Amino acid sequence: MQYQIREASLEELYRVHQEIPEFPGKASLDFYRNRLKHRLFLALLAETEGELIGFKVGYQSDIPDTFYSWMGGVKPEFRKLGIANALAEYQENWAKEKGFRSIYFKTRNRFPAMIAFELNRGFKIMEVIPKGGVEDYRIVMLKQL
């Protein structure tokens, strides 16, 4: 299958977000606008034949020289095709070109596939933040660029 990675509008991100089953509740477009306003950010989409199949968005964090990979996902029927990796590679290359020296993100213990995916991409677990039950513990991962 062929697909393209391109920069996206917030409206497009929101449309794909709604189709990712792992995201509890439904975010609003204002959710994205409020988080990203006044920040340097990158919003990406994966698309095939006009269908939006995945996304990744991140922004400049409050930590100097560090980019925060905030959110992303691929629709279930398009997983295991390299799309998440292509989105992550694009984001990391962009961040490096912009002068960032590291990139980090947070996930939850309930997503072991995501943790394994990022460990395989060179991320290291930096912190575990207890929150709720053990499945909801936050896992903070970091990669030097």
Image (cartoon, rainbow, N blue to C red):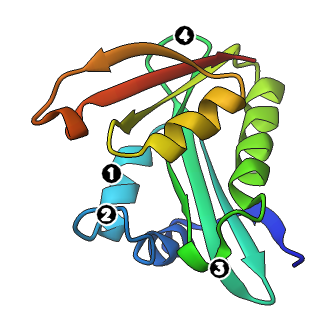
Number of the front mark, 3 or 4? 3
Of the pair 137 and 96, the residue shown nearer to us: 137
- Circles 3 and 4 in contact, beta carbons < 8 Å: no
Q: Secondary structure at mark 2?
A: helix
Residue 23: name its quadrant: bottom left
Of the pair 42 and 108, the residue shown nearer to us: 108
Percent of width and height locating residue 44 = 67, 58
Residue at numbered disc 1: 34
Q: Secondary structure at mark 4?
A: loop
CA neighbours of label 4 inside 10 A, class few (<14), some (14 to 19), many (20+): few
At 62% across and 13% down in the image, what residue appears? 65
Amino acid type, label 3: Leu
Residue at numbered disc 4: 64
- Circles 2 and 1 in contact, beta carbons < 8 Å: yes
Residue 145: name its quadrant: top right
At 30% across and 30% down in the image, what residue appears? 138
Residue at numbered disc 2: 30
**Mark with earlier residue (3, 1):** 1
Mark 2–mark 3 Cα distance, whole angstroms, equals 20 Å
CA neighbours of label 1 inside 10 A, class few (<14), some (14 to 19), many (20+): few
Number of the front mark, 2 or 3? 3
At 54% across and 10% down in the image, what residue appears? 64
CA neighbours of label 3 inside 10 A, class few (<14), some (14 to 19), many (20+): some
Residue 6 visible to the viewer: yes
Residue at numbered disc 3: 52
